[in-house]
Image (cartoon, rainbow, N blue to C red):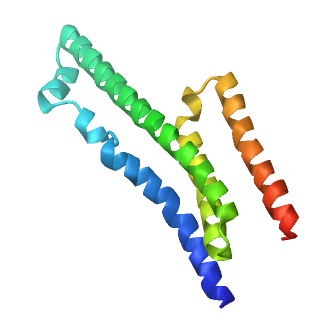
Amino acid sequence: MLAKKIALGVGIAIVLPMLIHYGVATFYPEPRPEDYRLSAETKSLAHGSASDQAKFEQEQGRKGDELTAAEAQFERRLFAVAVPLGLVAILVGTFLSVQATGTGLMFGGIVSVCDGYFNYWEHLSASFKFVSLLAAFIVLIFVGYRKLERKGI
Protein backbone atom coordinates (compact mmCIF):
# COMPACT_ATOMS: atom_id res chain seq x y z
CA MET A 1 0.00 0.00 0.00
CA LEU A 2 2.84 2.39 0.77
CA ALA A 3 4.36 1.78 -2.66
CA LYS A 4 1.06 2.70 -4.30
CA LYS A 5 0.89 5.92 -2.31
CA ILE A 6 4.44 6.80 -3.28
CA ALA A 7 3.73 6.02 -6.94
CA LEU A 8 0.61 8.19 -6.87
CA GLY A 9 2.44 11.08 -5.23
CA VAL A 10 5.37 10.89 -7.64
CA GLY A 11 3.00 10.61 -10.60
CA ILE A 12 1.10 13.74 -9.59
CA ALA A 13 4.37 15.57 -8.93
CA ILE A 14 5.56 14.76 -12.46
CA VAL A 15 2.32 15.26 -14.38
CA LEU A 16 1.15 18.53 -12.76
CA PRO A 17 4.06 20.71 -13.94
CA MET A 18 3.85 19.17 -17.41
CA LEU A 19 0.11 19.77 -17.47
CA ILE A 20 0.59 23.43 -16.60
CA HIS A 21 3.46 23.92 -19.08
CA TYR A 22 1.70 22.30 -22.00
CA GLY A 23 -1.61 23.88 -21.04
CA VAL A 24 0.03 27.27 -21.51
CA ALA A 25 1.63 26.04 -24.75
CA THR A 26 -1.79 24.93 -26.02
CA PHE A 27 -3.28 28.40 -25.74
CA TYR A 28 -0.05 30.32 -26.42
CA PRO A 29 2.14 28.09 -28.61
CA GLU A 30 5.85 28.05 -27.93
CA PRO A 31 7.83 29.65 -30.74
CA ARG A 32 9.50 27.14 -33.01
CA PRO A 33 13.03 28.05 -34.15
CA GLU A 34 12.33 26.63 -37.61
CA ASP A 35 9.70 29.34 -38.10
CA TYR A 36 12.46 31.94 -37.77
CA ARG A 37 15.00 30.39 -40.12
CA LEU A 38 16.28 32.28 -43.11
CA SER A 39 15.02 31.38 -46.55
CA ALA A 40 17.36 29.74 -49.05
CA GLU A 41 17.35 32.97 -51.05
CA THR A 42 18.46 34.98 -48.02
CA LYS A 43 21.13 32.41 -47.12
CA SER A 44 22.60 32.74 -50.60
CA LEU A 45 23.30 36.40 -49.88
CA ALA A 46 25.97 35.34 -47.37
CA HIS A 47 28.31 34.44 -50.24
CA GLY A 48 27.56 37.47 -52.41
CA SER A 49 28.86 40.99 -52.56
CA ALA A 50 29.51 43.14 -49.51
CA SER A 51 26.05 44.71 -49.76
CA ASP A 52 24.47 41.24 -50.08
CA GLN A 53 26.39 40.08 -47.01
CA ALA A 54 25.17 43.14 -45.11
CA LYS A 55 21.58 42.32 -46.10
CA PHE A 56 22.13 38.73 -44.97
CA GLU A 57 23.47 39.82 -41.58
CA GLN A 58 20.65 42.32 -41.16
CA GLU A 59 18.00 39.70 -41.95
CA GLN A 60 19.73 37.15 -39.72
CA GLY A 61 19.74 39.65 -36.85
CA ARG A 62 16.09 40.53 -37.41
CA LYS A 63 15.02 36.88 -37.39
CA GLY A 64 17.05 36.25 -34.23
CA ASP A 65 15.46 39.25 -32.52
CA GLU A 66 11.98 38.07 -33.52
CA LEU A 67 12.65 34.61 -32.09
CA THR A 68 14.03 36.08 -28.86
CA ALA A 69 10.97 38.33 -28.48
CA ALA A 70 8.58 35.44 -29.16
CA GLU A 71 10.38 33.23 -26.61
CA ALA A 72 10.27 35.99 -23.99
CA GLN A 73 6.54 36.46 -24.54
CA PHE A 74 5.88 32.73 -24.10
CA GLU A 75 8.10 32.60 -21.01
CA ARG A 76 6.25 35.59 -19.51
CA ARG A 77 2.92 33.82 -20.01
CA LEU A 78 4.28 30.58 -18.56
CA PHE A 79 5.58 32.47 -15.53
CA ALA A 80 2.23 34.22 -15.04
CA VAL A 81 0.39 30.89 -15.03
CA ALA A 82 2.87 28.39 -13.54
CA VAL A 83 3.90 30.33 -10.44
CA PRO A 84 0.40 31.15 -9.13
CA LEU A 85 -0.98 27.70 -10.00
CA GLY A 86 2.04 26.09 -8.38
CA LEU A 87 1.46 28.06 -5.18
CA VAL A 88 -2.23 27.13 -5.24
CA ALA A 89 -1.30 23.45 -5.72
CA ILE A 90 0.98 23.65 -2.69
CA LEU A 91 -1.80 25.14 -0.56
CA VAL A 92 -4.45 22.71 -1.83
CA GLY A 93 -2.08 19.79 -1.26
CA THR A 94 -1.65 20.89 2.31
CA PHE A 95 -5.36 20.80 3.05
CA LEU A 96 -6.11 17.45 1.41
CA SER A 97 -6.65 14.58 3.78
CA VAL A 98 -5.45 12.00 1.23
CA GLN A 99 -1.75 12.03 1.99
CA ALA A 100 -0.40 10.73 -1.33
CA THR A 101 -2.48 13.16 -3.38
CA GLY A 102 -1.63 16.08 -1.14
CA THR A 103 2.07 15.27 -1.22
CA GLY A 104 2.00 14.91 -5.01
CA LEU A 105 0.26 18.28 -5.37
CA MET A 106 2.77 19.92 -3.07
CA PHE A 107 5.79 18.55 -4.96
CA GLY A 108 4.12 19.25 -8.31
CA GLY A 109 3.37 22.79 -7.17
CA ILE A 110 6.98 23.35 -6.16
CA VAL A 111 8.22 22.06 -9.54
CA SER A 112 5.64 24.23 -11.34
CA VAL A 113 6.83 27.33 -9.50
CA CYS A 114 10.40 26.43 -10.44
CA ASP A 115 9.39 25.90 -14.09
CA GLY A 116 7.88 29.37 -14.20
CA TYR A 117 10.92 30.96 -12.59
CA PHE A 118 13.58 29.06 -14.54
CA ASN A 119 12.07 30.01 -17.87
CA TYR A 120 11.57 33.71 -17.14
CA TRP A 121 14.30 34.41 -14.56
CA GLU A 122 16.55 36.48 -16.82
CA HIS A 123 13.69 38.87 -17.66
CA LEU A 124 12.67 39.61 -14.05
CA SER A 125 13.97 42.65 -12.23
CA ALA A 126 15.85 42.07 -9.00
CA SER A 127 13.06 43.67 -6.96
CA PHE A 128 10.39 41.48 -8.59
CA LYS A 129 12.52 38.38 -8.03
CA PHE A 130 12.82 39.29 -4.38
CA VAL A 131 9.15 40.11 -3.80
CA SER A 132 7.78 37.09 -5.66
CA LEU A 133 10.26 34.69 -4.07
CA LEU A 134 9.43 36.17 -0.68
CA ALA A 135 5.74 35.46 -1.33
CA ALA A 136 6.55 31.87 -2.33
CA PHE A 137 8.75 31.47 0.74
CA ILE A 138 5.98 32.78 2.99
CA VAL A 139 3.51 30.28 1.49
CA LEU A 140 5.96 27.43 2.17
CA ILE A 141 6.63 28.60 5.74
CA PHE A 142 2.87 28.98 6.33
CA VAL A 143 2.24 25.49 5.04
CA GLY A 144 5.06 24.05 7.11
CA TYR A 145 4.16 25.81 10.32
CA ARG A 146 0.37 26.07 10.28
CA LYS A 147 -0.54 22.79 8.70
CA LEU A 148 2.23 20.27 9.08
CA GLU A 149 3.66 21.22 12.47
CA ARG A 150 0.25 21.29 14.16
CA LYS A 151 -0.58 17.82 12.83
CA GLY A 152 2.72 16.48 14.10
CA ILE A 153 3.72 15.12 10.70
Quadrant assignment for the N terminus: bottom right
> Front-most of 128 and 31?
128
Question: Is residue 86 rendered to the left or right of residue 42?
Answer: right
- Please report the residue visible at 70 percent of the width from the left and 30 percent of the height from the top: 131
Quadrant of residue 72 within the rendered picture = top left
Report x, y in % for residue 40: 14, 32
- Looking at the picture, does residue 111 appear above or below residue 10? above
Q: Residue furthest top?
A: 51
Question: Is residue 146 rendered to the left or right of residue 7?
Answer: right
Report x, y in % for residue 98: 65, 75
Quadrant of residue 67 within the rendered picture = top left
- Looking at the picture, does residue 8 appear above or below residue 122? below
Report x, y in % for residue 26: 32, 49
Q: Residue furthest bottom?
A: 1
- Please report the residue visible at 63 percent of the width from the left and 82 percent of the height from the top: 5
> Front-most of 3 and 121?
3
Report x, y in % for residue 137: 75, 43
Quadrant assignment for the C terminus: bottom right
